[in-house]
Amino acid sequence: MAASGRAGRSHSKVTAGMLGAQYEVTKDRSIRLRVMPEQSNDYRVVVFGAGGVGKSSLVLRFVRGTFKESYIPTIEDTYRQVISCNKQVCTLQITDTTGSHQFPAMQRLSISKGHAFILVYSVISKQSIAELSPIWREICEIKGDTSQIPIMLVGNKSDELSREVSTALGMELAKKWGCGFLETSAKTNHNVKELFQELLQMEKRRTMSLQLETKKSKSQKRKEKLKGKCSLM
Ligand SMILES: Nc1nc2c(ncn2[C@@H]2O[C@H](COP(=O)(O)OP(=O)(O)OP(=O)(O)O)[C@@H](O)[C@H]2O)c(=O)[nH]1
Ligand SMILES: [Mg+2]
């Protein structure tokens, strides 16, 4: 797919994260976008939500096990984890998006390429739950039938005491949208792994798990067999 520029004049190529897209800067300095073919053993999860609700914190807590009090707004980042899919090794690609609403074209592309979605609001901001509605509408518009798509609604910052959004309100919205629901805290690591586990379990077309089911080698099997037969004297 060529957005602009002429064929055969490519200068440099940059691969754009989970989208599998390549941007080519041509000699006349125009940018050409190429969407690469699907990588069948990739599973793409996209995280959406308003600025500052804790999208990056949740992803970093899950991927690296870390948490920072400081706030650096994101443009777009992609992280990769190896997981098990249909008893094979597969790559879980997590795209952490911007909360700034400045790049609607990027948002649409992320939705069309995404297999599953995490919609995050902050329990200390009523505004942040309201800001998810346009994203939800866009997912419905682009994907059509959302009943087959794993989607989790997430109320983050559950460790905070100054709540504006009750658990009941979050659950009600999730029921209305027909998606999963959890309250999390990236800060205290509450429900973070569970969030990704639940999302993968919602996928009906593949059997996915965060745990790798590796095949045991012959010598490992023999060792285990021997262990079973031995007893301590
Ligand atoms: N108390 C508390 N603070 C959190 C939690 N998660 C994130 N934060 C803080 O909230 C601020 C924003 O977090 P980010 O993860 O950068 O938010 P974001 O949604 O990625 O923001 P954008 O990239 O701008 O869209 C940071 O100061 C975090 O330390 C949480 O679970 N509890
Ligand atoms: Mg961020």
Image (cartoon, rainbow, N blue to C red):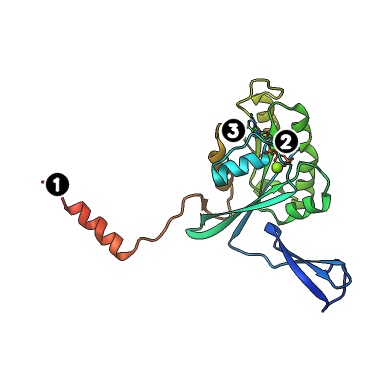
Q: What residue type is labelled 2?
A: Gly
For the residues labelled 1 and 3, say whether their Cβ atoms are less than 8 Å apart: no
Q: Looking at the picture, how far across and down is residue 226, in whole percent?
A: 20, 57
Q: Looking at the picture, how far across and down is residue 182, in whole percent?
A: 60, 34
Which of disc 3 and disc 1 is earlier in sequence? 3
Q: Is ligand 1 less than 8 Å from the beta carbon at label 2? A: yes
Q: Name the residue under label 1.
A: 232
Distance from disc 3 to disc 2, alpha carbons, whole Å, reads 13 Å
Figure quadrant, ligand 2: top right
Which of disc 2 and disc 3 is earlier in sequence? 2
Instruction: Residue 16: name its quadrant.
Output: bottom right
Distance from disc 2 to disc 1, alpha carbons, whole Å, reads 57 Å
User: Mark 1 Cα within 10 Å, few/some/many (few <14, many 20+)?
Assistant: few
Q: What residue type is labelled 1?
A: Leu
Is residue 148 visible to us here?
Answer: yes
Q: Looking at the picture, how far across and down is residue 138, in whole percent?
A: 79, 46
Q: What residue type is labelled 3?
A: Lys
Residue occupying the point 68% across, 57% down: 18
Q: Mark 2 points at which residue?
A: 52
